[in-house]
Image: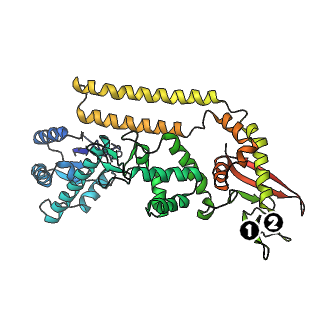
Amino acid sequence: MIIYAYFYSEPLLENDLEIPINHLKIDQSYHDLGARYELEKLLNDCQKKPPNYLLIGQLEDLGDNAEIVKNTYQKLTNLGIKILALANNKLTDLDELELLENTTKIDINDPKLLETIKENQRNLSLKKGQALTRIKALPPPGKAPYGYRRGKDCYIIDRSTAPIIKDFFEQFLLFGSLRGAVNYLAKRYGKKISVSTGSRWLKNPVYRGDLKYKNNEIISNTHMPILSREEAAQIDRLLGRNRKLSSKTASAKHSLVGLVSCQKCHQSMSINHVTQRKKKKDYLYIRPQNCPLTPQCKAIPYQEVLQKTIDYICQNFPKKVKNFDPQKIATYKNKIQTQIEEKKDIINQLSFLVKSNILDDQTANLRRYHLNLEMSQLRSQLEQLPPENLKKIADAVSLPRFWQDLSEAERRFYFREFIRQIYIEQTSKVQWNLEITFII
């Protein structure tokens, strides 16, 4: 028994080139990548010595359109060759091959089958077009994101709407509140958006000068950004902090909301307003929610907790970053930057390789695309590193006056930059201790 196998792969779409045959003896194997040179060789070889079976991945592998597929199929079957389309089946022995032959009968003249082949070819053509868009780093189809308009080869900043979205980002960076930034747009510009839309804006790589495609691959520096890399990294940190908090506490009025928990009963602590009759002054207390203990943990004046939090930061945060070595960060950054420059050099050489007929345009574009992906991942690593001037930042926040000059919203922003959790341990009815876990 003679068995041939033929498989076609589209280099723009497929990364897995594994042939789905396990331990089955194949007399001759043919594999085309992009063009169908091997298919022509297969047809010539079959004229000289027809096999009993020809294994293919799917019928669409036999040509670029339904008519070519039909003609190729008929040429081969006229030679007495049995064609088996494996699809997602994997063969391990002859018994499975015969079983597949009995269960997959192909009538190439069936109008429904031909229409299915046509539809699959149309889908493949569409996917190839989308892949070419990615490889050339062109904007995906559809309307440009708010703040941009479509140019010939890239997004162009829309000067009428870009200032609005820039102001939105600045509001979020200043106060760390998504709902606050959304409400600001409605009040300042009459631009009403939902909170979910605002969240998408904050996460959208397009505002950072990058393009993200449906396969979640990101190409960096494809157009002019609205956000700087530093601002984008800060937004990511804020979103990461807020993700651990409920939507209400993420934009709460008071800076300690969502950060404090009771060490004794392990419950998060909320802010309670207390007013006295006929008096305008509010008294703020912080107390555990749903404390299960008897007697329950007591409420503590909010201002006392706030002051002790500031004192703790001033005393302990500089110690926390004392062993921080900016030289190590600088060395690591230089290492990544060197890798990025090496990849840039390779990209610059691709045009020469094409002109020298060492590479064709398609292969060069595909290589350029993957190099850009790798550079995007390296840049992402750079953005996640702590700032080299962390010790200077620690010196600034260790000054009590720094905190006194801030509003509650501004304090909330800085607290969530540095604090993971604040723990309060009540040692008696009137005494308590405070401990902070820093993020760094």
Determine the secondary structure under disc 2. Answer: loop
- Front-lying residue, 52 or 304: 304
Residues under labels 2 and 1: Cα distance?
Answer: 9 Å
Q: Position of residue 335 (x, y in %)?
A: 52, 27
Badge 1 amino acid: Asn
Decide: is 188 above or below 341: below
Rate crowding at label 2 as few (under 14), some (14 to 19) or many (20 or more) other CA atoms within 10 Å.
some
Rate crowding at label 1 as few (under 14), some (14 to 19) or many (20 or more) other CA atoms within 10 Å.
some
The tag earlier along the polypeptide, 2 or 1, is 1
Marks 2,1: beta carbons within 8 A: yes
Determine the secondary structure under disc 1. Answer: strand
Decide: is 429 above or below 406: below
- Front-lying residue, 389 or 137: 389
Question: Which label was assigned to residue 21?
Answer: none
Badge 2 amino acid: Ala
Q: Position of residue 37 (x, y in %)?
A: 17, 38
Q: Residue at x 17, y 58 (%)?
A: 118
Number of dots carrying numbers: 2
Tag nearer the camera, 2 or 1: 1
What residue is shown with label 2?
299
The color scheme shown is rainbow
What residue is shown with label 1?
272
Q: Position of residue 231 (x, y in %)?
A: 52, 44
- Front-lying residue, 43 or 182: 182
